[in-house]
Amino acid sequence: MLTLEKRPNPSRFWTIVTPLLAVALTMIAGGLLFAILGKNPVEAIRTIFWDPLFNEQFAAYSRPQLLVKAGPLVLIAVGLSLGFRANIWNIGAEGQYIMGAICGTAVALAFYPAEHWYIFPLMILAGALGGWGWAMIPAFLKNRFGTNEILVSLMLVYVAENVESWMAFGPMRNPQGMGFPGSRNLQQYPAAANPELIPGTGIHWGVVAAGLAVLLAYALLKRHIFGFHVRVAGQSPRAARFAGVEPKRLFTLCMGISGACAGLAGLFEVAGPSGQITDSFNVGYGFTAIIVAYLGRLHPIGILLAGLLLALTYIGGEIAQLQLNLPASAIQAFQGMLLFFLLGLDVLSNYRIKRKGAQK
């Protein structure tokens, strides 16, 4: 008989190995899924993971897109990871991403068609404040009334999606757009655009912000008292009180940081690759970033690597849809398997499997 026995301390070995094992099992399970759909599983896995980087037919487009897709995932995941480490569960980053994009776009449209150097910095500030403000709603309700931040932040995603749709069909609709929903294209407004900084690389200000977020988060966790409070709150809430941690203050800070990061990701996306607010602007980055955060073990460097891996599945998934006629839902299920296996295997970090004799 096999039972689970709690470890005195989390296993460092399994903490490192489980993400790798989860990726391997995802490939196996994904291959079975593709086989059931009538596709060659080896070809499908190769198309998703190999072709975007090494097939010259796709590489010229796919390699720059790797950074474009990874940027928002890493930026959002780094913000979420600080809260997750402290057992603060912001599940509404998708809504904060949307509100950051809307607020940043509002600033751009307010100045249109003026060309001033300060427009884009103001958009960045508005994007961060938009995401921060949306995250402050569950923070206030939690601190004031003891509500569940998981439910509140998640429900606010759907509110944000409706606000997005209203903006696309109403106040932000392009007056020269022939009646189609959607704002002006910010890529065509130089003062508000977020183009590639180095042509052909995919690097724009959002990618730079993601890199800076990784470095700042690493410094906060290793060198700052805030990082100590985050770690101790996650490991032992009771010990955290003796260490001088104020739970409400820490909750507000973590929610605010994660909301601001999500808002910035939305702003950089709407001013760059996406270009405009539409009723379908959001593509699930806020939810996928949760997978990125946990696949990266809530560590900034791990999140950077995990973000690149998930970005690869996005790009490879698009190629697989075109080349192999795989449905988009199959690619989404494939990505979901990664989180499923990661959470399932994560039990090995805190528990060991022990053989127990049959009880009389």
Image: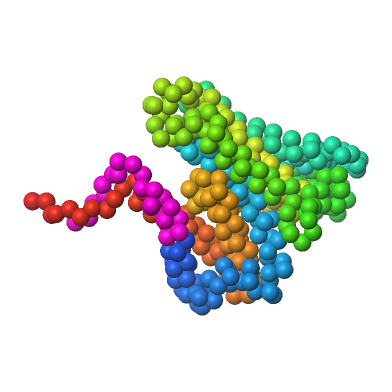
Left or right side of 230 for 59 = right
In the rendered image of this protein, does residue 251 appear above or below residue 6?
above
Residue most extreme to the right: 114
Q: Residue at x 69, y 60 (%)?
A: 65
13 part of magenta stretch: yes
Q: Residue at x 41, y 29 (%)?
A: 237
Left or right side of 356 for 192 = right
Q: Position of residue 227 (x, y in %)?
A: 52, 33
Q: Is residue 182 visible?
A: no
Q: Is residue 21 visible?
A: yes
In the rendered image of this protein, does residue 287 appear above or below residue 139?
below
The stretch in magenta equals 1-22
341 part of magenta stretch: no
Q: Residue at x 44, y 66 (%)?
A: 29
Q: Nearer the viewer, residue 317 or 353?
A: 353
Residue most extreme to the left: 360
Q: Quadrant of the N terminus?
A: bottom left
Q: Position of residue 281 (x, y in %)?
A: 69, 51
